[in-house]
Image: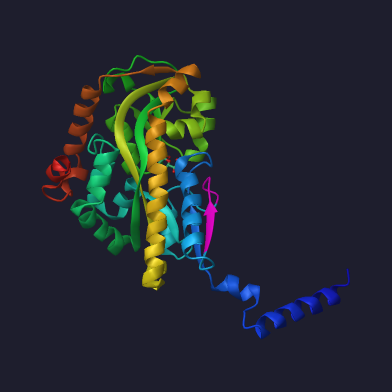
Amino acid sequence: MNLSLVRRGLLAAGAALILVGGLPPVALAQNKVPLRISTPAVPDDWHAKMWTVFKESLDKSAPGEFDVQINLNATLFKQGTEPAAMARGNLELATISAFDIAKLVPEFSIFTAGYIIRDPDHMQKVFNGPIGEQMFKPVSDKMDVTVLSTIYLGTRQVNLREVRNVKTPADLKGVKLRMPGSKEWLFLGEALGATATPLAFGEVYLGLKTGTIDGQDNPLPSVRAAKFYEVTKQLVLTGHLVDGIFLSIANKTWNALTPAQKQKVKAAAVAAAQYNNENRIKEEGQLVDFFKQQGLQVATPDVDAFRKHVQGVYLASEYAKVWPQGILERINATK
Ligand code: KDO
């Protein structure tokens, strides 16, 4: 095709659009607010799919206003580096873990401690009430991000390459348990009695397959979605952390939105959370059977022994020293 003809055609189309009072398509795309998202989640996991719910919600409530770009599998930013990317203005949205927050907001480490949040319902009540309000304030001040909704990642369980008789933390002695790579995560692994080994989520499957690690901990839906059950033989239902991640937006982006846009973005974040939370809770209730069918041994340890040990380790740690006074009691009293 003759290129100059094509160009002339495009110019004519652009001029026609301007004549009818519209803007050329390129300018329209430029006017959209870019919302870049980065997550380590694998496509088949609920907290990956929820971003499509987020996008669809905004496409419906604010057509043409936002350019939502979903990047899964940590392809845009490495796991745990999202808050820094948001602060630099290179990323607008992410799900941030309590462990990421605790690095900059030390008192938030209370939510990295095992056996504090009781269940998904307790989690929502804690974060959607006065405790959430109090604890998200320094997150905004120090990290320059606003939390829009609380995502239930699931209840973390221990998942081992080889079957072991695990009843108490002492039985995990010497087990190279993979944890995400930060000292707050490694502390949790050690508190469980294991030898915590840092590794990014995307490398866990291979680590389990080749034996560079003996196990990992994650909620059951992630064990399914990331196919860790293919390369492990046992699940030990420690239920050590009712884990939440926080759907957050960079303050620079948030503050530039109109009140109407803020309301729509918030509603999309709440819809995404609801989609994830409902599906994840439902699936958690069904997966033990699935894993058994896959040939995994599913063991129930002495959870009270784990709880007592893990809580003792945290309470005696440096972390507990910066927890706001009375917060543990308030969390426990939240019903
Ligand atoms: C993980 O690396 O084990 C973890 O579960 C940590 C979470 O905070 C979160 O980053 C999650 O991975 C990813 O979203 C992948 O599911």
Q: Residue pushed farthest front?
A: 20
Q: Residue pushed farthest bottom?
A: 19
How many marks overall?
A: 0
The magenta segment is 67-75
Residue 70 lies within the magenta run: yes
Residue 222 lies within the magenta run: no
* Res 304 → quadrant: top left
Identify the residue at image location x=33%, y=46%.
99
Q: Nearer the viewer, residue 271 or 141?
A: 271
Q: Quadrant of the C terminus?
A: top left
Structure colour scheme: rainbow
Residue 3 screen position, x and y as percent:
85, 73
Identify the residue at image location x=53%, y=45%.
73
In the image: residue 316, left or right of residue 29: left
Identify the residue at image location x=35%, y=61%.
145
Q: Is residue 185 visible?
A: yes
* Res 249 → quadrant: bottom left
Ligand 1 lies in which image quarter?
A: top left
Residue 197 screen position, x and y as percent:
40, 34
For residue 201, above or below residue 212: below
Residue 283 screen position, x and y as percent:
42, 32
Q: Residue pushed farthest right?
A: 2
